[in-house]
Amino acid sequence: MSTAALIVTLGSVVLAALLALMMIPVLVWLERRIAGLIQDRVGPNRTNIMGFRLGGVIQSFADVIKLVFKEEYYPGHIQTGRALYILAPAITFSAALLAFMTIPFADTLHVSGEALRIQALPVDYGILWYLAIGALGIIGVLFGGWLSHNKYALLGTQRAGSMGLSYELPLGLAVVSMLLTYNTIDFNAMVAWQTQTVLGFLPAWGVVVQPLAFILFSVALFAETNRAPFNVVEGESEIVSGHMTEFSAMKFALYFMGEYIAMNSAAAVIITMFFGGYQLPYLSSAELIESFGTFSLALMVITPLIIYAFIRWMRRNNDVRSTLSHDGGRRFEARVLTIVLLIKLVVLELIFAYFAFAQPSALQTQIAVAVVQIAVFIVKLMLFNIFFIVVRWTLPRFRFDQVQRLGWYYLLPLGLLNIFITAIVIVGVGS
Amino acid sequence: MSESIIFYVLALFLIGGASGMITARRTIFSAASFMLAMIALAGMFALLNQSFLFLAQLLVAVGAIITLSMLVIVSVNISERYIPKEPHLGRDLLLGVVIAAPIVALIITALRTHFAASFAPIPDTFGTLASIGATLFASWVLPFELISLLLLAALIGAVVISRKGERS
């Protein structure tokens, strides 16, 4: 294994772990802030470290610290199977984390004849891995709920099991129709396929080519990840907290974080299969490498505008009413962040200037393109996570029988229909 | 070296899970042990570089079969007193091991001495998803479709049997 391969592998693993784990506090914060926005209130914005609030993200860290230091409490009525009871949340958590590991973050690097995938697990069966590992999460729910010896937990467990099974089918059927379209199970090859254009001007993203499969896939994933409107498993107004009722402290936190990682992985799979993954629309990796000088020149112009707008927005919002004498360090935070952002802007401008005016080597350009693609991937990921959150706070929860009817009576036949249509179109195009 | 260490660890989990499944008194521990054995088996396939078998094992055995059996356990709620008493379980198992041991030894010796030379090394494409798909849908398409029909018949049969009471 060469040094380059080692660096790329380590880098991808660290990136994947960071993207999965560091996304949790951000997502929890986003969820609460967006819920506040939709319900016309502010959301968490008070917790701070020396005045630093970062818009409220610090609240998530405070929550984690609270959960870590909470007393480990075992319900007295759980006599046997305590080891399995503790293990159950860990199964759900690790299944969700592992399912994220085959997502490609940037196009394959070519370093001295070696093709290096920017994937934590550089395998070519990405979607199958996601389906296989993602389905394991339900087992932790089943074990935990059954061992809780609690009526509400049992109801939640039954709902989780039967819903997981019913929505696995439309999910699989949507994947099959996408496999027919892309003719591959490799995430990288799927993204490469999506750099084409259809009708001459639209990017051939999965959502353009297969809109029905996109709807089926996302609805099934909403159900698989227990997100509203399908969160009947833990429907608070009906069955307390479902399978999590008897869990407390870090055991509960593992279930909770597992849910957010699963949502994050689902968003990553959706953008990889339906929204061009790490690619910018109309710009394939080869084109981007070829004209990276022009591209960085464009970035040189755009970046200051974005950072200026962001600073303006931050300074306007990170303030208190003028009648209050003490602002709790908000202006101080805004000042420090402004300086940090300006330094960041200067560094970015220097880097862009290097790529625009100096003569970077081919390897440098490749790495720069990979970094740009990782940034594009993260932006798309955040947008889709926000979509998940907005849907949760917009739609009311389904009744459980409605969930099952939707899965079996509508999604399943639609999935079969979509496969038929796809097959006919592919045979028609091929002949 | 590291391969054989992984193999022995997986084998330990496999045997431990399998024996745990038949000796556990509570159904939930049987299910957990079964899951352990199935994951260890998937690990064995991964160790042999058979990505398709590995994924199919996880997808079917762990993802579907364990989930379904857990769902049955959760729904049926079998109390321990309804499970038949097996006072001589340990003795019976030991007896079974003693009886099976010579046959297993015979199979291992035969594989090692007589057949080992006649095994051809497998090609690189063996067991990949593409080669399995090509084999199934090109050379064996009729048996494949017949098996699908059989499964469909079984499915419909299950539905008919389970709905019998409602008709009257």
Image (tube, coloured by chain):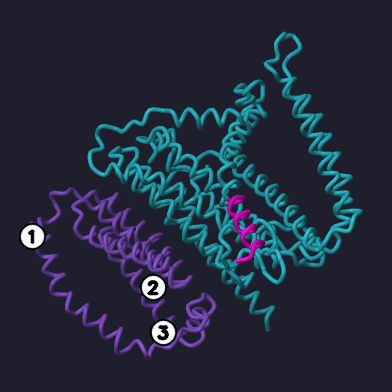
Compute the Cα span from label 1 to label 3: 44 Å
Q: Indicate the quadrant containing the N terminus of chain B: top left, top right, bottom left or bottom right.
A: bottom left
Q: Which mark is residue B88?
A: 1
Instruction: Assess whether residue A366 is covered by the magenta stretch.
Output: no
Q: Position of residue A279 (x, y in %)?
A: 73, 58
Chain letter corresponding to the colour purple: B
In this view, A310 is above or below A90: above
Residue A430 horizontal/vertical position (percent)? 68, 81
Q: Is residue A313 left or right of residue A88?
A: right
* Nearest the eye: A117 or A264: A117
Q: Residue A147: horizontal and vertical position, in percent?
A: 29, 43
Label at residue A78: none
**Dot 2 amino acid type:** Leu
- Secondary element under disc 3, as helix, strand or loop, is helix
Identify residue for label 2.
B152
- The magenta span reads A1-16
Q: Chain of mark 2?
A: B
Q: State the residue in front, A134 or A123.
A: A123
Picture quadrant where residue A186 is located: bottom right
Q: Quadrant of the C terminus of chain B?
A: bottom left
